[in-house]
Amino acid sequence: MKSQTEYLTFNTRKPREYINITDRVAQVVARSGISEGMVLVSAMHITAGVFVNDAEDGLLADIDEWLESLAPYRDGYRHHRTGESNGDAHLKNLLVHHQVVLPITAGRLDLGPWQQIFYAEFDGQRPKRLVIKALGE
Amino acid sequence: MKSQTEYLTFNTRKPREYINITDRVAQVVARSGISEGMVLVSAMHITAGVFVNDAEDGLLADIDEWLESLAPYRDGYRHHRTGESNGDAHLKNLLVHHQVVLPITAGRLDLGPWQQIFYAEFDGQRPKRLVIKALGE
Amino acid sequence: MKSQTEYLTFNTRKPREYINITDRVAQVVARSGISEGMVLVSAMHITAGVFVNDAEDGLLADIDEWLESLAPYRDGYRHHRTGESNGDAHLKNLLVHHQVVLPITAGRLDLGPWQQIFYAEFDGQRPKRLVIKALGE
């Protein structure tokens, strides 16, 4: 069995950002030397997510607006009694989820034609980590 | 380590459909010869999902209505400026997610009594692929 | 390849409860003897979920209120024609998902500083099972 584990750190300029990390995940897969396996891509924070969707700017703006409509930034979350103001970011994280698992086939990330991997920052402007772990043979 | 990778193609009659694929996933697990492992079941498109729930027609209709209420088919998505009209399907995909990972124990898909695996088509009437990859020993 | 599979059973006092199972998952990882791998944590019922978030009581109350607002307990779900009354629990399960996959690195659960694993019960007061399966080397 082979494994390869790498960490990325993001420090976004805006509170919310969607960053295409497909190439970086593909590079980890290439470095792993794995022919058949799976790769886990997982945010290590509870106010950030990872999802697979289309690299189309209009769609990413739609996604951002939609997440804000379902899990709005607002006062009044109980979580804010701790001094935090990011209750919405925790809920957005639950909506899109913090991780994906992707297939590795014949030594490559086995994605469909439009599938791109995004790191979704919901409470940025500070360093946040993500782990990429490939496992297989 | 053993692995088994198979692809299914769906071409639904309706734009939205929910197809029970539990038996097909179980067959891949059987062909893999894996005793202990995991199987990834993942849509290869960004307008389709995979989820685990109950094979009960009323519930599937409830799920469809609920997804439509949270991520409605409508004009006005920015994504439609590209000529597409399936903005809602991308959001529904984010809600239910495009993949599940299931345990293989003692050579079988290790599901609970009511757990069934569904392919969820949100923008059908054309060929769409899904990958099933079992990994283990 | 090594694997370790264990089952937990929950029988909550309330219909909805959020139970921190991080230590129990870490114990399975320790017993597995796996140095590099992944661990799948998956509810075996379709009215319960597993998610990773912050162990902060105010936030858990926010999450519960938010799930209830997006997938309310109510009459009128088609699923209730079967005699059930838990349509909302199925939808809440779809929202938070029934499983997570977590990295094992250097023999330990490789979580970020605030990441805790929760079993989310949406239709409790009866025995419900969860499977934890670690895989790696």
Image (cartoon, coloured by chain):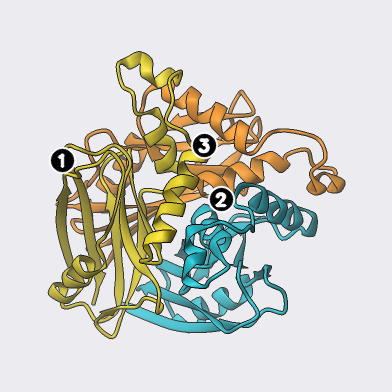
Chain colours: A yellow, B cyan, C orange
Q: Nearer the viewer, mark 2 or mark 3?
A: 3
Q: Amino acid at mark 2?
A: Met
Q: Is residue A80 above or below residue A54?
A: above
| Residue C43 shows in this picture | yes
Q: Which mark is residue A127?
A: 1
* Residue located 45% across and 21% down the image: A77
Picture quarter with the C terminus of chain B: bottom left
Identify residue for label 3.
Answer: C120
Q: Amino acid at mark 3?
A: Ala
Residue under disc 1 on the same chain as residue under disc 2: no
Residue under disc 1 on the same chain as residue under disc 3: no
Q: Position of residue A10 (x, y in %)?
A: 17, 48
Q: Is residue C75 above or below residue B130?
A: above
Identify residue for label 2.
Answer: C44
Q: Position of residue B95 (x, y in %)?
A: 53, 52
- Residue C131 versus residue B47: which sits nearer the camera? B47
Chain holding disc 2 = C
